[in-house]
Amino acid sequence: MSVLVYTESENGAFKKASLEVASYAKGVADMMGTSVTAIAVNGGDTAPLGTYGVDKVLNLKDSKLDAFNAAAYAKGIAAAAKAEGATVVVLSQSANAKYLAPLLAVELEAGYASNVVALPESAAPFKVKRTAFTNKAFNITEISTDVKIVGLGKNAYGLKENSAAAATEDFSADLGTFGVEVASVDKATDKVSIADAEIVVSAGRGMKGPENWGMIEEMADILGAATACSKPVSDLGWRPHGEHVGQTGKPVASNLYIAIGISGAIQHLAGINSSKVKVVINTDPEAPFFKAADYGIVGDAFEIVPQLNEKLKAFKASNS
Amino acid sequence: MKILVCISHVPDTTSKINFTEGDTKFDTNGVQFVINPNDEFGLTRAMWFKEKQGASVDVVNVGGPETEPTLRKALAIGADTAIRVNTEAKDGFQVAKELAKVVQDGGYDLVIAGRESIDYNGGMVPGMLAGLTGANFVNTCISLEVDGTNATATREIDGGKETVTTSLPLVIGGQKGLVEESDLRIPNMRGIMMARKKPLSVVEPAGAATETTAVAFEKPAPKGAVKLVDTVDELIDLLHNEAKAI
Ligand SMILES: Cc1cc2nc3c(=O)[nH]c(=O)nc-3n(C[C@H](O)[C@H](O)[C@H](O)COP(=O)(O)OP(=O)(O)OC[C@H]3O[C@@H](n4cnc5c(N)ncnc54)[C@H](O)[C@@H]3O)c2cc1C
Ligand SMILES: Nc1ncnc2c1ncn2[C@@H]1O[C@H](COP(=O)(O)O)[C@@H](O)[C@H]1O
C-alpha cells in the first residue's frame, strides 16, 4: 500500500505543480499511515521531490515517451500503481494530466475526482472536496472503488516541505500501441502559460482594440505574468483563442489576477474565481467585477496602466 | 462515417446555483437548461462533416425525460436522430459505460464529446468512453479533419497547441476552436419543425454501476468588500505588503 503521485517534468526539471501534488500526496499518506511513491516519465534530478515528502521515485525512462502520449503515459502510471499496490493516485490538473486521468481510471478501475481543493475529509470512506458548477460551488465526492484517483487543482494545497530520501529506481512498463502520434508542437517558449502562471494580466473590451495591448503585454513582462482576455476579445480576433479565460475558456487559478477593462460577467468570474488575489481596473464603479475583487481602482485604463507599469518597474528594480 | 455527438444537458451559464434537500441536490427550480457549450461546438463541427463529407450524425444523452428538449434542439440544429438512455446520470464512469454500449451497438466511427460539462466539470466522460471502447482519444480538441479512416487533430496544451495524427475509431473531447463562435447555429423555424418529426429513441440503460457519489454541496463563503484605492502607489503597496502577491 502507498500513495502514488504522478510528477510531470518539463525540460528535465519537475514543474512547480509536481511539487504541489507531491506535498499533497504526503498529506494523504500521513492520513493513511503509508508512504509516497512518485512516478516520473523521463524525469531529471529527483532530489526536489524528496524535499516535498516523496520516499521513492520510479523513473520511467523511454525515448518513445519524449512526446506526450496520454494512453501510453496512463499505461505507465497504471503499471507503477499496480507495482506499488497504490490505493490512491494523485495527479495535477495540467492539460496533460487531465487528458490522461480518465484513461488511467479505466486502466485501474478506479474512481476519479477532478478539481479537488483540499486533503480528504476522511480516508475511509474516502471523501474529497472539489469545485463544481465552474467554481460557483463545491461538492463533496465520495469515491467507492479500491483505488482512488485525485486530480488536485492548481494552488489549492500549496507547497509543504517534508524531507524524505526519494530513492530513485528505473522503471519500465508495457506501453501498448500508440494510436495517437504527435506531428508538431506549437508553443511559445518565451511566454508564461496561463496554466503555469503565478500572475495573470487580463484585459477586456474596455481596451477598445488590439492595437492597445502593448501596455498589457508590458505589464505581463514586468511581472513575469501570462496574458489573458475576456471571451468577446478573442471572438473579435483581437487576441488568440488560447487567451480566452472564463467558464467556456481556460480556468485561471493563479496567485494574482489583474483584470483591466473587464466588466465581470458571471461567465467570466466563474472561470477566474479560484485565483487568490483579484485586482480590477475599470472606469465604471458599478461594474460587477468590483464585487468579486479584493482590490480595485475606478479609473481609465489608458491613464492608470501606463502609470502602474512605470511604478511596477521601479518596484521590481528595488525589490530584486 | 457514422458520428455520435454526446450532449450533456446543463444549466445555462447565467443560472444561479442553489441546492435543496439539505444541500445534497442541485435545485433545478427556475433553471434554464441548454446544450453544454463544449458540445455545441462539437455538434456544429459534426454538421460540417455531414454537409461536406456525407457523414451521418446522431446525438445522445444519458438522462431522464427532462433532457428531451435539449436533444430536440440538437435535432433542430441538424442532427439526424437522437438517442436518450433512460437513466439519471450519476457519475462520469456510469455515463461513460452507458455511452460505450450505445457506441458499440451503433458502430460509430467518430464520437464527439466535450472537454467538460459546465455543471459538474468532471472532464472524464470522453476519456473513459475511449478507454472502455478501445478507441483513440484526443482531448481539448480545437480542430479536427478526417480523411478516410485517418484523422488529424489539434489540441490545446498548456501554453500552446499540438497537432496529432490518429485514426478512427476516435473519441474527442472538444471545445471552442472546433468551430468559431460565429459558426454556431441558432435553430430556425424550419429546423424546429423538422426536428419534431425526427426520431428520438429512448433506450433502456445497461444499468452500469457508479464509482463516485456527490454526497453534498457547499456554496463558497461570501466575499469581503473590495478595497478601493486612488493611486497606483497604494495598489503596489497593498499587493506587496498585505496580499503578498508581488
Ligand atoms: C454561454 C456563454 C458563455 C460565456 N463564456 C464566457 C467566458 O468563458 N469568458 C468570458 O470572459 N466571457 C464569457 N461570456 C461573455 C460574458 O457574458 C461577457 O459578455 C463578457 O465577459 C464581457 O467581456 P468584457 O468584460 O471584456 O466586455 P464588456 O462587458 O463590454 O465590458 C467592458 C468593460 O470595460 C470597462 N471600460 C471601458 N472603457 C474602459 C477604460 N478606458 N478603462 C477601464 N475600463 C474600461 C467598461 O466599464 C466595462 O465594464 C459568455 C457568455 C455566454 C452567453
Ligand atoms: N449525461 C450525459 N449524456 C451524454 N453525454 C454526456 C453526459 N455527461 C457528459 N457527457 C459528455 O461528456 C463530456 C464531458 O463531460 P464530463 O466528463 O461530465 O465533464 C460532455 O461535454 C458531453 O459531451
Image (tube, coloured by chain):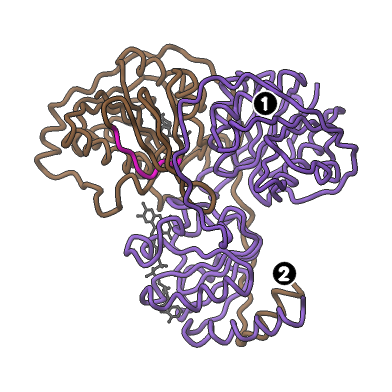
A125 on left or right of B124 = right
The answer for which chain carries disc 2 is B
* Residue A201 place in picture, x, y as percent: 55, 68
Question: What x and y, as percent, mark residue A130?
Answer: 62, 41
Chain identifier of the residue bearing label 1 in the image: A
Residue at image location 52% in from the left, 77% down from the top = A281
Q: Is residue A13 left or right of residue A27?
A: left
Q: How many marks?
A: 2
Question: Is-magenta flag for residue B143?
Answer: yes
Q: Is residue A89 above or below residue B45?
A: above
Residue B114 vertical placement versus A179 (above, below): below
The residue closer to the viewer here, B220 or A65, is A65
Chain A shade in the render: purple
- Residue at 44% from the left image edge and 39% from the top image edge: A183
Under mark 2, the amino acid is Ala
Q: Is residue B21 above or below residue B83?
A: below
- Residue A148 circle label: 1
Which residue is at 77% across, 78% downward?
A319
Tell me the SS state at disc 2. Answer: loop
Identify the magenta region.
B140-146
Residue A60 appears left or right of B127:
right
Q: Nearer the viewer, residue A161 or B240?
A: A161
Question: Which chain is drawn using brown?
Answer: B
Where does ligand 1 appear, by image quarter?
Answer: bottom left
* Looking at the image, residue A310 lies above or below residue B145: below
| Location of the C terminus of chain B (image quadrant) | bottom right
A226 drawn magenta: no
Residue B209 screen position, x and y as percent? 53, 16
Q: Which residue is mark 2?
A: B243
